[in-house]
Image (tube, grey):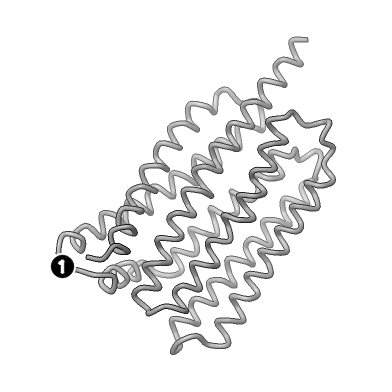
């Protein structure tokens, strides 16, 4: 087995276990949150629970392959047995829940429900065009113009969503935010700016490299991205929500 095989194989286990630990933490923290802030814990529980199930499924699915004299092509074939629509359905659902945490943590009363709906719709379009791009790649020989077009549109939607979040963050009245809330939003933006770029990069691996190597390298990249964009993101969001709850309780007691 190659180094890439081992890294990818154990990254499924690492991601699954990290997501389980995150779920336990979010469950413990949920009762400490006030009102609508508990929704942030609930969303992170759902996201990380789904992530743990998917990644541990792949880890157990690949165990027989890892036990034998298999390589990246066999791993790519096993990964490819999960229908593409299931994979993108998972991304569509989890990314929508992650992105809506921005307006929830900012405060819907400040940014408006329309902003949350806008982010969800852009995210859905971004994931859908990514799906069309990858499907075109699998259906054709090599890198087709159709696939490049869909991936380009998906990347442009990600940039538009990034710009939209930045604009709203810039207009937020910082004096109304507690330090932990303000810091968390800044860190979340950079997680989004850098961390979410891992996914488009992962798709291009499957287009540029040999089919087997490209698929396995993409999975390793996406697994690293899931630890950053789901687990660490969730810890950051829930910590900020807990600090906001403490501040609200202090104000009520004053």
Q: How many discs mark residues in the rendered view?
A: 1
Locate the N terminus and report the quarter of the image it occupies.
bottom left
Q: Which residue is rendered at x = 51% and y = 47% of the image? A: 230
Q: Nearer the viewer, residue 29 or 169?
A: 169
152 vs 79: above or below: below
Residue at 35% over, 53% down:
12
Indicate the position of residue 16 as horizontal and vertical percent values: 37, 47
Q: Position of residue 200 (x, y in %)?
A: 55, 67
Q: Is residue 152 above or below residue 67?
A: below
Q: Which residue is mark 1?
A: 69
Could you tell me which residue is drawn at 62 percent across and 81 percent down?
149
Q: Which residue is pictured at 42% across the width and 43% down the height? A: 19
Secondary element under disc 1, as helix, strand or loop, is: loop
Q: Is residue 34 left or right of residue 220?
A: right
Residue 124: quarter of image: bottom right
Is residue 21 positioned above or below 125 on the image? above
Spot occupied by residue 158 in the image (x, y as percentages of width and height): 66, 64
Determine which quarter of the picture holds residue 120: bottom right
Nearer-the-camera pick, 165 or 109 = 165
Q: Callout 1: few (<14), some (14-19), or many (20+) C-alpha neighbours within 10 Å?
A: few
Residue 6 locus on image (x, y percent): 28, 59
7 left or right of 36 in image: left
Q: Quadrant of the C terminus?
A: top right
Q: Residue furthest top?
A: 254
Residue furthest to the left in view is: 68
Residue 245 shown left or right of residue 10 in the figure:
right
């Amino acid at each position: 087995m190659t180094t890439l095989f081992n890294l990818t194989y154990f990254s499924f286990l690492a991601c699954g276990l990290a997501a389980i630990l995150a779920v336990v933490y979010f469950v413990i923290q949920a009762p400490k949150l006030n009102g609508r802030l508990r929704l942030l814990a609930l969303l992170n529980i759902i996201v990380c629970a789904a992530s743990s199930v998917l990644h541990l499924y792949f880890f157990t699915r690949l165990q027989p392959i890892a036990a034998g004299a298999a390589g990246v092509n066999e791993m790519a074939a096993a990964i490819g047995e999960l229908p593409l629509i299931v994979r993108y359905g998972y991304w569509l659902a989890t990314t929508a829940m992650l992105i809506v945490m921005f307006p929830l943590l900012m405060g819907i009363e400040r940014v408006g429900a329309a902003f949350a709906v806008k982010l969800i719709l852009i995210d859905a379009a971004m994931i859908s065009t990514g799906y069309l791009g990858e499907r075109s790649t699998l259906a054709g020989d090599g890198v087709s113009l159709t696939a490049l077009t869909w991936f380009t549109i998906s990347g442009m939607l990600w940039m538009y969503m990034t710009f939209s979040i930045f604009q709203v963050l810039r207009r937020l009245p910082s004096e109304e935010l507690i330090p932990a809330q303000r810091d968390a939003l800044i860190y979340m933006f950079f997680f989004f700016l850098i961390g979410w770029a891992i996914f488009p990069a992962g798709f291009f691996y499957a287009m540029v490299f040999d089919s087997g190597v490209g698929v396995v390298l993409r999975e390793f990249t996406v697994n690293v991205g899931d630890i950053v964009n789901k687990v660490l993101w969730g810890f950051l969001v829930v910590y900020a929500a807990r600090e906001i709850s403490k501040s609200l309780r202090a104000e009520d007691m004053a």
